[in-house]
Amino acid sequence: MDEKRKDDIYYVCTMIEFVARATRNRRKDIVAKMSKENIEHQLRVAEVNHCLSFEQVSDEWIEQYNIPMGNYDTIKECKYTVPPVTAIGRVYQRLVIATAKENEEAQTIRDVFSSFISDCISDFNSNIYYSNPDYLRCSYEEGYMLA
């Protein structure tokens, strides 16, 4: 996989995190509003969109994909410093790259964000989001957090 594709995956993962925080939704609720084709489109336009503010792109996604406001607030209950959206985007990017088959990155993004591990990563009171990428990959592949 070339560096541009990795950057595009990183950008889309970061935007999913940003939109989820902005709308107080679970990450799986954001990708549920987006088809595989929508995510493929976002991967194609990531190079252009990264020149825009997260706020502007977030507003466009919220309108385009009809994302409602929710009540899942990972920030309010956090006792510690909240990791930036870019740091969480990197966690997801690594997981997607580690588990995606060639040309299946859009579906893998949907699968990862829709899985159990997304809520685990979003629990900023835990240590999951800064765990070893191999641990996250193995846990994701097994379907539960390994001991």
Image (cartoon, rainbow, N blue to C red):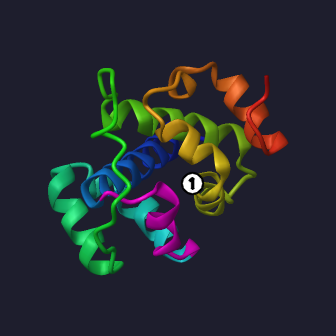
Q: Give above or below for 38 relative to 19.
A: below
Counting from the top left corner in percent of width and height, residue 130 is at: 52, 21
SS for tag 1? helix
The reply, left or right, for residue 112 in relation to residue 35 is: right
Magenta-colored span: 24-36
Give residue 105's position: percent from left, percent from top: 62, 55
- Of 72 and 105, the residue lying toward us: 72
Quadrant of the snapshot with the C terminus: top right
Residue beneath the point at 33% across and 80% down? 66
In this view, which residue lies farthest toward the right?
Answer: 142
Q: Is residue 87 above or below residue 115?
A: above
- Is 31 within the magenta? yes
The quadrant holding residue 70 is bottom left
Which residue occupies 84% across, 40% down? 142
Residue nearest the observer in this picture, 73 or 53:
73
The spot of residue 111 in percent (x, y) is 66, 58
Residue shown at the point (48%, 36%) measured from the top left: 123
Query: Where does the image place residue 47, in percent across and percent down from the top left?
Result: 33, 52
Query: As shown in the figure, which amino acid type bears the numbered disc 1?
Result: Phe
Instruction: Please indicate, yes or no, whether residue 73 appears anywhere in the rendered image.
Output: yes
Q: In this view of the protein, which residue sits in the foreground, 107 or 146?
A: 146
Position of residue 79 in the picture relative to residue 120 (left or right): left
Q: In the depicted view, which residue is nearer to us: 117 or 52?
A: 117
Relative height, residue 59 to residue 65 (above, below): above
Label 1 crowd bin: few (<14), some (14–19), many (20+), radius 10 Å: many
The image quadrant that residue 74 belongs to is top left
**Residue bearing the label numbered 1:** 113
The N terminus, quarter of image: top right
- Residue at 31% in and 74% down: 68
